Amino acid sequence: MKARERILARVRRALAGRPEAALPSVPEGAALSKEEAFELFKTRLSAAGARVERLKALEEARGFLKEAEAGARTAWVSPLVPGPLRPRLPEAPPEEAELGVSRAVAGVAETGSVVLSSREGRRGQLLVPRHLVWLLEDDLYGTVLEALRAVRSENAAALALHSGPSKSADIGQIMVKGVHGPGELWVGVLAFRLEAAGDEPPELRDTLFQLVGRTLKTKRGEPFLVEMVNDRVVRVRTRGGAGKTLEVPVPYLERAAQRAREGADLSGPSRLRKEVGDRAAAYAWAILHALGYV
Amino acid sequence: MPPRAYPKESQALLEARPEVRESVTKAALHFDKNRARAYGEVPIEAWRDFAAQTKEHVLSRLDRYLEEAEARLVEKGVTVHYAEGPEDAHRILGEIVRKEGVRLAVRAKSMLTEELGINAFLASQGVEVWETDLGEFIIQLAEEPPSHIVGPAIHKSLEEIRALFAEHLGTPEDAAPEELAAAARRFLRERFLKADLGISGGNFLVAESGTLVLVENEGNIRLSTSLPRVHVAFVGIEKLLPRFEDLSVFLQLLARAATGQPIGTFVSLIEGPRRPGEPDGPEALHVVFVDNGRTAALADERAHVVLRCIRCGACLNACPVYRQTGGHPFGFVYSGPIGEVLAPALLGPKEAYPLYHASTLCGACAEVCPVRIPIPKLLLYWRERAAREGLLLPFEKSLVRAYAEAMVRPSAYRLASKAMRLFPGVLKSETLPLVRAWTRLRAGLEPSPRPFHELWEEIKDEG
Amino acid sequence: MKVALFATCLLDQFFAGAGVATVRLLRSLGVEVDFPRAQTCCGQPAFNAGHWDEARKMARHTMAVFEGYDYVVLPSGSCGSMLKVHYPELFEGLGEEYQRAVDLAERTYELSQFIVRVLGVEKLGDGLKGRALAYHHGCHALRELGAEKEPILLLENAGARIVPWEADRECCGFGGVFSVKLPHVSVAMADRKIDTLPEAEALVSTDAGCLLHLAGRMKRRGKPIPIRHLAELLWEARNAA
């Protein structure tokens, strides 16, 4: 590490006796109402060549999805996307899929951006020609600053802000879309609660995705992060020292939820173990608790 | 081609390839117009103050921020290296290439890797390397250096690019821009999927969080930093920002200054290699902090402000000198106004001579700089140092001395004034070098029949 | 009010008529004008080329020449900014001389700014009715002195129409010594101005250097339009009132 020491020494020599310049506070942007935020979000993203819709019910979301599916034979779908919002297309790896479906961890109105996490995989966000991103309206922020604060605790190797389709004007100043990344960006802003979408009680697996990225606590107060959800498992990471990863099977959670509906006493992890067995029951119970099943 | 060749190279370019002036002017004015509109939409003066002060703060405690950034990066599983110059950078990269068995690399546009000659080095190691930014790809095919910080190929017309792609990629002679882009996409997509190594620069690096930030419009940087199993980022030591939240202004300011967009189409916030459970991403991430003249610039109390630069290219677009030729004649990685003050700060005033003279001091650059670098002031600073340190031709110094001696003697001034009218041919002469420099391209000077100071004697008592 | 005219060397030699116009214009506005005979060059060419010792020498001379006047008025943006902006920089840290430089800077005005800001006059007369003029904003007048509105205001209020010109705020490429150090780039910049110049009966500016350069290039290219110094037009504006 000789270069390191030499560089640091030169920096210190250069700065010797130089006063510390003041660090200004970060300017806060203007607060926007929900409606204003969506309008600005749509204006900015549309100007960048993306398609944006505010979807007030599951049916509208499904309609939007259907349009996005048009012409595509295969799809890559992020594990963060809940069942009802997954395309009815055969799945394919990102390098072959003709449609990619992501779920944003946040949105920014002032720049017209969706924030995507590497937890769902990056290839699917980049290699597909058409990229559909679901964004919960509650996750849409007015300013970059608010969004950065909100995603600060994301446990991901990389976050990315996408603010339109891939573009370049490097050929004679003529704007071309889809140069390397997706040539089409579709953003569906979900302005409804998924579980309230129909008269039927929501399927457990459709509501699980809301927990992704959230920190929950077990009954004994141990915090853990819900890292990923797909159709098979909920993956959680404990917060202590090294932090270990555990997987809670979705069918196991569904059996427990069914028992709860039938009136079984699931007032704690030990009761849960008794009723449906032990598959990381402490965490499973906390998940069911967060969703209001127990 | 060194900076010293600027006068010759700029002349040669203007005479031999006038179409470059046309392409560059058109593109730069387009960028500048968009910037002006984009500045008007936001509290730009407050943002510029914030950005300038934040950068100035980081620079004033750069040692502390480097150590903080390094600690955060290491915690996140990043391997951190330091490079004093190109040799160190090559050695570090060479070791990674050998250890990882790299055969194919993709490069995401970065001016610092241009400084370090990374492409040539990789080629010498038997590594196939592809530029993935469309503009960089074009000039890689043309075997030219970039001519603009943001638009490396703005000097190339559609016709030239058509010919280039027809030759290398087999596209039709009359291909539309969309077809050309699609051909580049297909060609590079294959390389992205096969590459072992992705090389990037870094627009910002947040010290408190160890976040590497990259901004782009095409998606090639995201692909270069997501697909290959190894990612190496070369980051200038001046790129640090203290706080994650600082990005809220810098991301917007950079985009608005560079192209007039609210934000770059793709912004990567990278905090380490792929984490457990993530479906993809590089297995290894290396950050190389590069000095390459920056500590020398920092040590100069007057000139260190160039290190605030965020490489937006706004000053190039605003600069009428740059617009006549584009970046090539400058003979330095960075051209235009910022190049004229970065070159002496990074290379020293001797090596950079006469770039800091390639300006009329019109001030258009300082008017647009998002971090308020007082470029004209710095140009004057370097000119003064060059004169003081004897870097100019002795002929110039004696000429200026004689001129100054005459000008403090009103009688000498008036004598010269008379002489000019007695020998009017002098101002049209083709033999005196200074006069010829004027008359070769312009009509000769014609003084007023009588100078004002003589007319004054006639009007001084008018009512 | 005792006002000294600093004609500047370029105007003295190449636009003598504009000097006469300046004197008559200021007198018509009730100003007592003097022309200190010892004035020469402000030193800007040496300053811009980095020869600050020589520039200081000329600046000292100039400061002495203009001692004791309430105002120093220049029909030039470039030399005006040399006195107003750069003299204090030149003498930074030099105690008493710095104070003298600051004192001179405070008393120094470019002609149109003097008329509008000091004299408070916004209308000189109607002498420019129906005239279509192209106005070149000299860089130092525009960006260092902020003389953006004043010349236009005075011309328009006298009835002139300033024709829209996309390059009116771009540098013409003169740049003093730059024009002979890098002549090819310099005239390429002039060509951009000339190629975008709309139809107008004259090209007007407050800076003699820019006008000489543009006129020289237009003549060489064989498409000259008349060039006029701002001072001459302001006097014409006044004259017909």
Image (tube, grey):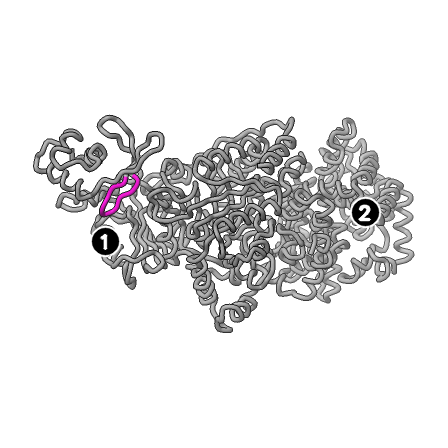
Where residue B336 appears, x then y in whole percent? 63, 51
Where residue B57 appears, x then y in whole percent? 56, 32
- Number of residues whose C-alpha sits closer than 10 Å to that of mark 2, classed few (under 14), some (14–19) or many (20 or more): many
Residue at 44% over, 52% down? B228
Q: In which quarter of the image is the C terminus of chain A?
A: top left
Residue at 64% over, 54% down? B322
Magenta residues, dominant SS class: strand
As drawn, the label of residue C46 is none
A63 sits to left or right of B141: left
For this rendering, which residue is in front, C240 or A231? A231
Share a chain, discs 1 and 2? no
State the residue position of label 1: A62
Is residue C190 shown in magenta? no
Is residue A229 shown in magenta? yes
Q: In terms of secondary structure, where does tag 2 sit?
A: helix
Segment colored magenta: A227-235
Where residue C79 appears, x then y in whole percent? 75, 43
Residue at 60% over, 38% down? A3
Q: Could one spot residue A68 in this view of the protein?
A: no
Q: How many marks?
A: 2
Where residue A288 appears, x then y in whole percent? 19, 36
State the residue position of label 2: C9
Residue at 40% over, 52% down? A164
Q: Label 2 amino acid? A: Cys
- Number of residues whose C-alpha sits closer than 10 Å to that of mark 1, classed few (under 14), some (14–19) or many (20 or more): some
Q: How far apart are marks 1 and 2 (CA)?
A: 78 Å
Q: In which quarter of the image is the N terminus of chain A?
A: top right
Q: Mark 1 lies on which chain?
A: A
